[in-house]
Image (spheres, rainbow, N blue to C red):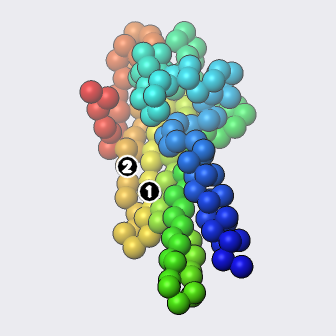
């Protein structure tokens, strides 16, 4: 009887070990530009040179204009949920297994039109409430093309 819970725990640990690592990337961007995630990212969540250009350019490919919201085929929103499992092996045989959900993180990024883009991130952790990450609206191509001069309004983390 004790073998089944231990096998279940082993399966859970193996699944967690084989699960993808946190990417903090938005899969809809990859679908939008019809490329793999590695087109913009190296060791996740680090952006490669093209990814930094894509981000700086307001989530637009070089030489393209942003789409209006209603033209975007998939709304670029991603979520990450952390799940924690704890197995307590008691000597008296009253073993327990509990699953907790410590946190959920939601992030989004999109163009709102040919020259307006936005990004946002919010994380909710159990017992700690919500934490607002970078949230901004970017006005693109105020001078020149391809992100020569952009203006970001909001909370923003620098890439360096």
Which residue: 37% across, 44% down?
134
**Residue placed under numbered mark 1 in the picture:** 123
Percent position (x, y) of residue 80? 54, 51
- Relative vertical location of residue 130 with respect to residue 113 in this rendering, above or below: below
- Relative vertical location of residue 122 with respect to residue 142 in this rendering, above or below: below
| Mark identifier at residue 103 | none
Which residue: 40% across, 45% down?
135
Which residue: 45% across, 13% down?
146
Q: Secondary structure at mark 2?
A: strand
Q: Can I make out residue 53 in this image?
A: no
The residues bearing labels 2 and 1 have C-alpha atoms spaced at a distance of: 7 Å
Percent position (x, y) of residue 8? 67, 65
- Badge 2 or badge 1: first in the primary sequence: 1
| Mark identifier at residue 133 | 2
Percent position (x, y) of residue 29? 60, 30
Q: Quadrant of the N terminus?
A: bottom right
The answer to whether 136 appears left or right of 17 in the picture is left
């Amino acid at each position: 009887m004790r073998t089944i819970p231990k096998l279940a725990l082993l399966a859970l640990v193996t699944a967690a070990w084989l699960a993808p690592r946190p990417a903090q990337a938005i899969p809809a961007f990859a679908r939008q530009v019809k490329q793999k995630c590695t087109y913009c990212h190296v060791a996740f969540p680090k952006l490669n040179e093209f990814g930094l250009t894509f981000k700086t350019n307001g989530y637009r490919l070089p030489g393209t204009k942003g789409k209006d919201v209603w033209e975007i085929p998939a709304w670029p929103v991603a979520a990450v949920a952390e799940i924690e499992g704890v197995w307590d092996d008691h000597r008296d045989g009253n073993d327990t297994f509990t699953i907790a959900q410590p946190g959920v993180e939601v992030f989004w990024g999109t163009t709102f039109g040919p020259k307006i883009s936005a990004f946002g991130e919010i994380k909710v952790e159990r017992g700690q409430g919500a934490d607002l990450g970078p949230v901004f609206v970017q006005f693109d191509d105020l001078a020149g093309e391809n992100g020569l001069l952009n203006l970001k309004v909001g909370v923003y983390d620098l890439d360096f």
